[in-house]
Image (spheres, rainbow, N blue to C red):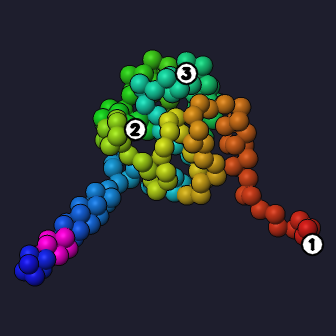
Amino acid sequence: MDVFLHIWDNMSILRLSILAAVFAISSLRADSPAEQKVLEAIKSPDLSVVHLWAPWCSNCQAELKSGGWLKMVKDNPHVKFYFVSVWNGGEDGRAMLKKFEISDQPNVTILADPGPRGSNHIKQFAGLPLSWIPTTWVYKGSDLRYALNYGEMRFPVLQQFLEDSKSEWSHKGEPSVE
């Protein structure tokens, strides 16, 4: 009986070790080429908008149909826009962006994360949580200025965020509240 318990204990330790190794390996996800491109691009001192979307997503389609993204891109030629298709099996959604005249704009870059749709989809991108699409992030010089992770964009709000992000966000010289 003692031998059996000893073998059982060793097998339990082995099982736990294997489980821990599998979990560690599965949680290590190398940055996709799209993530690498975005992480490099947001280092720019200019404003960057990272828009995570998928062509099959009805909320993403509604944003495109409204014409808001095309107007936003055209009205802000000095802002770089990164449309990153996620949860779409590596497809970039370029055809849909072309349909809405976004793909050929000079300040737009179209990227695709290789991850699948479904339960195995990515849950973070560029170090930030990703739980819903569309998701839109505004960066200036590697600093995340705004993160809109809730769904459809209200374009006047995004325009205000871009205007606000142009500032240095400094309160030097202002009186203290004390």
Crowd around label 3: few <14 · some 14–19 · many ≥20 (10 Å): few
167 lies above or below 85: below
Q: Inspect the image, locate mark 3, and give the three-letter code of the amino acid beneath it.
A: Ala
Can you identify the residue that label 1 sits on?
178
Separation of marks 3 and 1 at Cα, in angstroms? 47 Å
Q: Is residue 62 left or right of residue 119?
A: right
In the rendered structure, which segment of residues is drawn in magenta?
7-13
At horizontal 46% and vertical 56% (from top left) the residue drawn is 127
Badge number at residue 86: 2
- Percent of width and height locating residue 118: 34, 36
Mark 2 or mark 1: name the one nearer the start of the chain. Answer: 2
Q: Work out which quarter of the rendered image holds the C terminus and state it.
A: bottom right
Badge number at residue 98: none
Instruction: Assign a secondary structure to mark 3.
Output: helix
27 lies above or below 53: below
At horizontal 59% and vertical 30% (from top left) the residue drawn is 152
Q: Inspect the image, locate mark 1, and give the three-letter code of the amino acid beneath it.
A: Glu
At horizontal 33% and vertical 58% (from top left) the residue drawn is 27
- Percent of width and height locating residue 94: 39, 27
Q: Is residue 100 left or right of residue 90?
A: right
44 lies above or below 9: above
Q: Inspect the image, locate mark 2, and give the three-letter code of the amino acid beneath it.
A: Val
